């Protein structure tokens, strides 16, 4: 018989796991409710030692035991212990339990095994058993307690403002619409936590104003304004952008910082409820993570989430239902101390702004144009989906993937910010202010998700040294950035700065409390190969469906790998050509005379976007950058993909047009001295087996298309070794497939291409036919047929 006090511990843990509706993420899930994990602490072990089955040889310093269940393995025990913040590895576990003879197969059900021992650091007040007990008790008794003191909360914000992630186990971040539908209580807490963060004092480092201000303005040290580095920039925030080597790695701890604040606030709010509501919301706080907006998901086809377009939202608070300003719609600056950041030369377009807007196409009218943003983003859905899929399938290198992803990221920033052939008048298109808009975080969470997927599918490919970028704490921008470059201003609990090394292994995200459906927490024990297979299959299932429009059904025999010819416009230019945000817009046919209508034109293809500052911001340091924009969607819509390559060359040479723009409006081509544009095609093989990655042939330069155009390419060298602003030939820092460009010796007929989904705005067919095509595309992707 096990003493009643032992049952108490078990009961408390069951409440944590079951009543709180939390399913901890274990390598091997709990078999049933009756077999919930059971720990025994030192105090209870002494009282009941005679009644417990304990294997011989355990150390006398053991102070926490675990009851082996019928289906337990060493892995499951280690992961359960880690879930409850017990530091344990399989090797240590075997040392604690010598009777196992280093063989996990000899585990005996109903026996107690040692999972923690006393250490010099733990013998006073913070033993492993105390930590487990605290977690169990604080969770299981929350419904009865009225206090919200830090002692009862798991995620108390660090007083040193370190980035530690979320404690209490790993939970997958969710698509925002999935979270809203499937986790309504957690979503309710998210809105309340955002509202609390918005209302926090301007000087509070955990406030929305301060956390968002890390990215750019107000250009002050974070977290302590008195902690001024020896040298700082007067124009750049902490974030590295514009083909920056550290772009993806820097934003990971930044997202973690926001998430740990919101989960902490959500937990505090949950404890303010009473009765059954308290139990419900405390449980919801344990699974709450910040959501992402999947801007290439077939279900929404790049439409912006409905919730971010609502000005008001009804929430359940500890005081009952209330209608509040929707925190996902806009952030309102709290008085002159906050919105004064716009009253300076670096934000001249936004002088007078008091709240964030989107898609504002005219100066200083302080309106938001959600429908315009939605329309423009959705219009480029298929091309964006193809660009992102090809980046996810790329095995060229981490730096190349990061640069390709940043290009897609920039295009979305500028479109949301209202950029179209000239300046936008919303914060999302201005680097120093973008992070104040809540959609920034939904967007960047998806960037982090894409990065995590690529890392899981390419575990051996790490960040390589690359040219540095100017930031607030590194204003010179000299030298190279690498795996050991500090990711200012983010620090660990031990005071050391985060580096890219800390995020180079995708598995570290689980240690900081989150995963994604495609890189889920329950894959913690998977081998690198198994995780690669799992994530690659998930990426293919989600995103290859619109690259290959498949006609077969599931019950039909699987076809062989699909071969397709992919056409792309390749752009190379020096990022230091202009001040602030600028880009190159591409058209297949004449663009509208009014640049404000460029993105709405049926001839608009996409282009290269630089996310920059505004007003008197200084130019970026010189660095040749590249981008690749797919032509297949518009060629398919115009019925050209079945033509010969020579015919396509002729069509493109007559109709392909590019136009540069900056924050003043359209520019003359002669103003962009370093610009080079070339068209290539290459073969892409998309595997029938979802566990395999798509492969890419060497791109072939179509010289006929661009050789007679201003800034057009005549030979591969102009793209591979371009001339920078100083007149020097340089190698591309991240050239990717551009470095492999060849010139075809002969023209061959293009192989028949599978029909691709047709955008309504690009089609000459009847509206009803377009609607059927869109519906069929969605059904095929959902069914993976």
Image: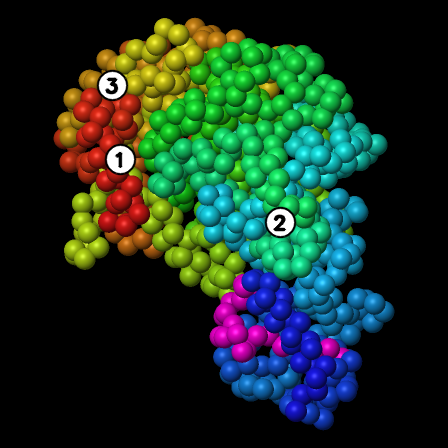
- Closer to the camera, 385 or 649? 385
Residue ranking furthest to the bottom: 50
Using the rendered view, name the quadrant where residue 490 is placed. Answer: top right
- Closer to the camera, 594 or 314? 314
Tell me if residue 372 can be seen: yes
Residue that carries the numbered disc 3 in the rendered image: 652
State which tag comes first along the sequence, 1 or 2.
Answer: 2
**For residue 219, side relative to residue 245 (left or right):** right
Residue located 50% across and 69% down the image: 29
Using the rendered view, name the quadrant where residue 53 is placed. Answer: bottom right
Give the magenta-colored segment's residue range.
Answer: 23-42
In this rendering, the count of numbered labels is 3
The CA distance from mark 1 to mark 2 is 42 Å
Residue located 54% across and 78% down the image: 34
Whether residue 30 is in magenta: the answer is yes
Q: Main secondary structure of the magenta part?
A: loop
Other-residue count near label 3 (Cα within 10 Å), few / some / many at <14 / 14–19 / ≥20: many
> Looking at the rendered structure, which numbered label has been put on residue 774?
1
Residue that carries the numbered disc 2 in the rendered image: 502
Tell me if residue 475 can be seen: no
């Amino acid at each position: 018989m096990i003493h009643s006090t032992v049952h108490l511990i078990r009961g408390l843990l069951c409440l944590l796991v079951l009543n709180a509706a939390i399913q901890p993420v274990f390598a091997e899930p709990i078999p049933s409710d009756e077999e919930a994990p059971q720990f025994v602490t030192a105090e209870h072990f002494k009282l009941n030692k005679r009644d417990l089955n304990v294997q011989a040889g355990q150390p006398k310093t053991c102070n926490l035991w675990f009851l082996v269940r019928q289906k337990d393995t060493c892995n499951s025990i280690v992961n359960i212990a880690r879930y409850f913040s017990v530091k344990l590895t399989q090797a240590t576990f075997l040392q604690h339990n010598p009777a196992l003879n280093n063989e996990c197969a000899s585990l005996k059900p109903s026996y107690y095994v040692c999972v923690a021992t006393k250490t010099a650091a733990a013998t006073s007040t913070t033993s492993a058993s105390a930590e487990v007990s605290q977690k169990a008790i604080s969770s299981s008794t929350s419904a009865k307690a009225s206090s919200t003191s830090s002692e009862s909360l798991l995620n108390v914000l660090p007083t040193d403002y370190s980035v530690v992630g979320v404690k209490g186990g790993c939970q997958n971040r969710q698509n925002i619409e999935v979270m809203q539908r499937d986790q309504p209580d957690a979503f309710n807490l998210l809105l309340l936590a955002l509202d609390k963060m918005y209302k926090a004092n301007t000087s509070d480092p955990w406030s929305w104003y301060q956390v968002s201000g890390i990215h750019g303005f107000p250009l002050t040290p974070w977290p302590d304004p008195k902690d001024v580095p020896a040298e700082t920039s007067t124009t750049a925030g902490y974030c590295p952008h514009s083909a920056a080597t550290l772009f993806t790695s820097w934003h990971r701890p930044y997202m973690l910082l926001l998430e740990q604040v919101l989960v902490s606030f959500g937990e505090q709010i949950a404890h303010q409820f009473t009765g059954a509501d308290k139990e419900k919301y405390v449980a919801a706080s344990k699974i709450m993570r910040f959501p992402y907006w999947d801007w290439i998901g077939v279900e929404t086809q790049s439409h912006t989430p409905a919730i971010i377009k609502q000005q008001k939202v009804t929430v359940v608070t500890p005081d009952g239902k209330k209608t509040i300003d929707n925190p996902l719609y806009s952030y309102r600056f709290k008085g002159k101390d906050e919105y004064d950041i716009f009253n300076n030369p670096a934000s001249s377009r936004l002088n007078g702004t008091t709240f964030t807007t989107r898609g504002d196409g005219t100066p200083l009218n302080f309106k938001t144009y959600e429908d315009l943003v939605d329309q423009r983003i959705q219009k480029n859905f298929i091309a964006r989906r193809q660009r992102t899929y090809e980046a996810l399938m790329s095995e060229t290198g981490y730096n190349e993937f990061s640069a390709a992803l940043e290009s897609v990221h920039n295009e979305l920033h500028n479109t949301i910010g209202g950029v179209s052939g000239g300046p936008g008048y919303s914060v999302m298109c201005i680097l120093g202010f973008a992070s104040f808009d809540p959609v920034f975080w939904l967007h960047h969470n998806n960037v982090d998700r894409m990065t995590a997927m690529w890392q899981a599918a390419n575990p051996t490919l790490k960040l390589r040294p690359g040219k540095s970028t100017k930031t607030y704490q590194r204003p010179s921008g000299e030298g190279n950035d690498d795996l050991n470059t500090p990711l200012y201003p983010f620090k660990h609990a031990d005071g050391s700065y985060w580096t890219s090394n800390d995020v180079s292994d995708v598995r570290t995200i689980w240690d900081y409390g989150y995963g994604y459906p495609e890189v889920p927490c329950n894959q913690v024990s998977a081998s690198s190969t198994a995780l690669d297979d799992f994530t690659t299959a998930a990426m293919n299932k989600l995103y290859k469906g619109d690259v290959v429009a498949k006609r077969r059904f599931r019950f039909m025999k699987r076809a062989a790998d699909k071969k397709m010819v992919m056409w792309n416009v390749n752009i190379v230019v020096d990022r230091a050509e202009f001040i602030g945000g600028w880009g190159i817009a591409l058209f297949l046919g004449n663009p509208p005379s009014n640049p404000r209508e460029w993105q709405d034109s049926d001839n608009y293809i996409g282009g290269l976007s630089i996310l920059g500052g505004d007003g008197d911001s200084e130019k970026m340091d010189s660095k040749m950058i590249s981008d690749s924009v797919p032509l297949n969607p518009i060629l398919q819509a115009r019925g050209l993909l079945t033509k010969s390559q020579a015919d396509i060359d002729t069509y493109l040479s007559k109709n392909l047009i590019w136009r540069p723009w900056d924050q003043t409006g359209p520019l003359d081509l002669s103003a962009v001295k370093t610009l080079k544009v070339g068209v290539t095609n290459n073969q892409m093989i998309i595997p029938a087996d979802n566990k395999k990655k798509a492969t890419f042939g060497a791109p072939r330069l179509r010289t006929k298309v661009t050789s007679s155009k201003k800034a057009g390419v005549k030979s591969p060298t102009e793209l591979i070794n371009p001339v920078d602003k100083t007149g020097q030939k340089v190698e591309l820092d991240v050239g990717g497939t551009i470095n492999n460009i060849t010139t075809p010796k002969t023209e061959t007929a293009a192989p028949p291409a599978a029909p691709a989904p047709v955008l309504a705005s690009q089609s000459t067919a009847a509206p009803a036919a377009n609607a059927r095509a869109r519906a069929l595309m969605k059904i095929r992707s959902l069914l993976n047929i």
